């Protein structure tokens, strides 16, 4: 039990990445299989990537960078000795920016939301633009709102909350970054178009995960020193 407690962040992250890999792989295989059916008229993956070359290239670079940040954060969480630099007060600011982006995507008409091209409309109109008949932007907004409210709970001043909030933030941001990785993968490889606003949100969520991991490290270090 003690060993599991020490490596709990690693279990969370690896389990989440494994589920993400299975989900992404399933969608990719299913989509690629449909492309080769004569009556579907799909676009091969190479051509799909060239439909939005700049956006898709940025998405792939961001995807690789996000995976590296997640793995590095998990590695640091499992180090016994670490002196992280806390970005506690940056968390609500980034969450507010992310919330604004998601609300913007959800409320502005399709023809007005995207820069520098119309790739956002392609994504909105795809089968991945909604989850359970709810626009992805609404789900993203709820995620950022949950992060903001969880962080705000720490202002109450309860010592118990101060012990729980960093771990809750870590769990929320891990869920958010896994979702962002999944959607960032879909954009270039399945949909063939990249939404810059979505990519910006994915980067913000990755930074939030990094900061949450550092906050947990600070808490663990403080507990180790003061008991």
Image (cartoon, rainbow, N blue to C red):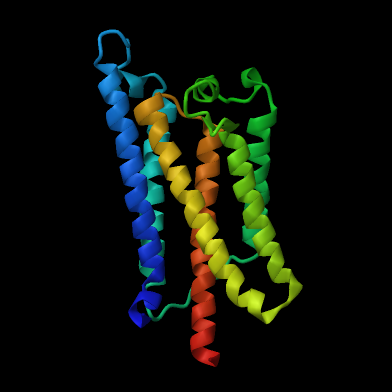
Residue depicted at x 70% and y 29%: 107
Return the x and y of residue 147 as percentages of the image width and height: 62, 56
- Position of residue 160 relative to residue 104, above or below, is below
- Position of residue 139 relative to residue 124, above or below, is below
Quadrant into which the N terminus falls: bottom left
* Residue 161 visible to an observer of this rendering: yes
Return the x and y of residue 49 as percentages of the image width and height: 34, 24
Return the x and y of residue 40 as percentages of the image width and height: 32, 11
Residue depicted at x 31% and y 31%: 28
- Position of residue 121 relative to residue 77, above or below, is above
Residue depicted at x 41% and y 41%: 182
Q: Nearer the viewer, residue 21 or 99?
A: 21
Residue depicted at x 46% and y 29%: 194
Q: How many marks?
A: 0
Q: Nearer the viewer, residue 150 or 49?
A: 150
Return the x and y of residue 184 as percentages of the image width and height: 43, 38
Q: Residue furthest top?
A: 39
Left or right? Give the position of 39 relative to 107. left
* Residue 44 visible to an observer of this rendering: no
Q: Nearer the viewer, residue 179 or 40?
A: 40
């Amino acid at each position: 039990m003690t060993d599991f407690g020490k490596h709990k962040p690693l279990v969370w992250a690896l389990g989440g990445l494994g589920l993400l890999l299975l989900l992404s792989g399933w969608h990719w295989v299913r989509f690629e299989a449909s492309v080769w059916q004569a009556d579907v008229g799909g676009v091969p993956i190479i051509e799909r990537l060239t439909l939005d070359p700049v956006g898709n290239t940025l998405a792939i670079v961001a995807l690789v960078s996000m995976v590296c940040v997640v793995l590095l954060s998990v590695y640091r969480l499992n180090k016994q000795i670490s002196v992280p630099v806390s970005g506690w007060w940056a968390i609500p600011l980034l969450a507010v920016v992310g919330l604004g982006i998601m609300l913007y995507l959800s409320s502005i008409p399709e023809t007005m939301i995207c820069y520098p091209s119309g790739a956002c409309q392609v994504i909105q109109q795809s089968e991945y633009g909604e989850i359970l008949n709810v626009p992805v932007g609404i789900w993203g907004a709820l995620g950022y709102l949950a992060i903001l409210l969880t962080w705000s709970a720490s202002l109450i001043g309860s010592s118990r909350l101060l012990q729980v909030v960093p771990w809750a933030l870590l769990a929320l941001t891990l869920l958010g970054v896994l979702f962002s990785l999944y959607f960032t993968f879909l954009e270039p490889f399945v949909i063939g178009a990249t939404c810059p606003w979505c990519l910006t949100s994915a980067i913000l969520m990755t930074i939030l995960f990094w900061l949450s991991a550092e906050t947990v490290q600070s808490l663990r270090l403080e507990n180790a020193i003061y008991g």
